[in-house]
Amino acid sequence: MNAAQRHARSFLSASVVLAAVGVTVLTLAALVVQGDPLDPWWLLAVPAIVLTSAAPLYLDRYDDWLAVGTEFCVLVMLSLALDWPQALSLWIIGVVLAQLVPVARAPRAFDASLSVVCGAVAVAVVSILDPGTFGYGEVMAVGAAFTLAFLIDIGVSVLRVHAAEPPAPGSIAARGYEVLTLYGLYVGVTAMGYVSVLLYRAVSPWALFAVLPALAIVLMAVKGLPRERETARRLNVLFETANALHSASTEAEVLAVLDAGVRRLGKSPGSGLRR
């Protein structure tokens, strides 16, 4: 990674973090002005965000993992059931705590900041477009809000990855099917949040416990899918590298094949052989 790429990556990361700080300050100010007490029952949304964030939806790109959190299903419910300052404050607390209690990777300020920004966009669109009653208008408002959040999440993540190392020609277009597949999974997860809202409105808050078994099954399936894909990918890279070594006749060719295999296996700009 050269100096220009490092500066571009740092600038993008800093911009996202500053945007998240601005969202947080605005939310706190709105809470103070609003002054409405929050029903303690809604505090359960915070551990729900932390738990669901442990099973993100992964997209295996050419050089890194891109992830969209399943915790957005909780935000769907918060955005429709609470005023935007309360919904967004619970969301911010949840995503920050999720980074402080990492399950599979070290906490990163960029990830939490991007989740805050995407959540703020979704909540803002819902608060503007939602008619407040079940119907086509509300479904379209939720769909537009969380589709926009998805696009921002993926788009900013891709820009950050490409700031470190430009993509190979045609690599982005070749991943279109994977992006659509990821979006389909994302729609299914967010739809579960909308079902929870309908249960909350029609029955009682306690009816939400009926959703827990389905949510647990979805999270276990989501958690297992990337692990299987990653294992299959690594085995495929090792097999192809071993096969290519049979055609290498010089030391330079052997080192070139090994270097290419290491780069594919590592999936990061810094992967490669070392002297």
Image (cartoon, grey):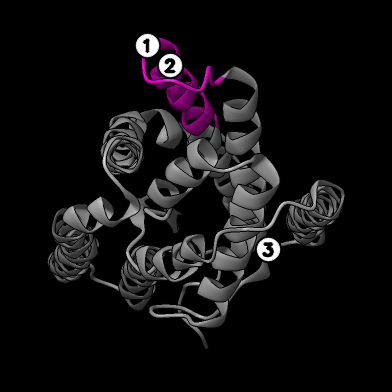
Q: Quadrant of the N terminus?
A: bottom right
Q: Is residue 269 left or right of residue 251?
A: right
- Marks 2, 3: nearer the viewer: 2
Quarter holding residue 155: top right
Residue sitting at 85 percent across and 55 percent down? Answer: 32
Q: Main secondary structure of the magenta part?
A: helix
Residue 34 location, x and y as percent? Answer: 80, 46
Quarter holding residue 252: bottom left
- CA gap, disc 1 and disc 2: 6 Å
Residue sitting at 19 percent across and 71 percent down? Answer: 238
Residue sitting at 59 percent across and 45 percent down? Answer: 119
- Residue in front for this viewpoint, 159 or 268: 159
Q: Per the image, is 121 magenta?
A: no
Residue sitting at 23 percent across and 59 percent down? Answer: 209
Mark 1 and mark 3 in contact? Answer it, CB < 8 Å. Answer: no
**Marker disc for residue 140:** 2
Label 1 packing within 10 angstroms: few (<14), some (14-19), many (20+):
few
Residue 90 location, x and y as percent? Answer: 59, 59
- Residue in front for this viewpoint, 41 or 227: 41
Residue 42 location, x and y as percent? Answer: 49, 60
Residue 97 location, x and y as percent? Answer: 56, 75
Q: Which residues are magenta?
A: 130-148
